[in-house]
Image (tube, rainbow, N blue to C red):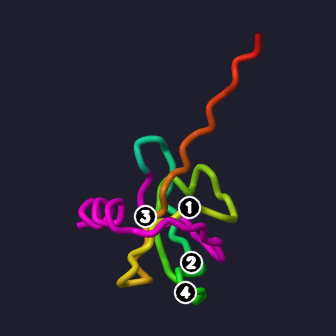
């Protein structure tokens, strides 16, 4: 179900940035040794309403940034998924 929801949001979700208000580590560690972070986030939807939602991610345990990229479901604002930002290309110095 989690993977199906992620696939759904990748197609229909709306991209925005959210602020992580609180988080805690819970559950087991992943293959890279990071615990899952359970986060409470706030973001503004397309009509300017402030939305409070929860999401969980192993990736957040690595970065612990205050602002994260998410996809949210325009039909259910509490349905969010944290997306990893593409790494910035390194410029070659000559």
Under tag 2, what secondary structure? strand
Q: Earlier in the sequence, mark 4 or mark 3?
A: 3
Identify the residue at the far top of this view.
94
Residue at 49% across / 45% down in the picture?
A: 33
6 magenta-colored: yes
Q: Which residue is mark 4?
A: 47
Residue at 44% across / 52% down in the picture?
A: 29
Distance between mark 4 and mark 2 Cα atoms:
21 Å
Under tag 4, what secondary structure? loop
Q: Earlier in the sequence, mark 4 or mark 2?
A: 2
Under tag 1, what secondary structure? strand
Q: Position of residue 11 (x, y in %)?
A: 32, 61
Vertical placement of residue 84 versus 77, above or below:
above
Q: Which residue is mark 2?
A: 40
Q: Earlier in the sequence, mark 2 or mark 1?
A: 2
User: Bounds of the magenta span?
Assistant: 1-29
Q: Which residue is mark 1?
A: 69
Instruction: Say which of marks 3 and 2 sits in front.
Output: 2
């Amino acid at each position: 179900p989690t993977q199906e929801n992620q696939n759904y949001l990748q197609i229909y979700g709306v991209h925005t940035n959210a602020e992580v208000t609180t988080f805690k580590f819970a559950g087991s560690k992943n293959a890279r040794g990071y615990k899952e972070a359970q986060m409470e986030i706030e973001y503004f939807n397309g009509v300017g309403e402030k939305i409070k939602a929860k999401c969980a991610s192993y990736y957040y345990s690595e970065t612990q940034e205050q602002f994260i990229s998410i996809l949210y479901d325009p039909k259910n604002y509490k349905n969010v998924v944290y997306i990893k930002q593409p790494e910035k290309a390194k410029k070659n110095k000559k």
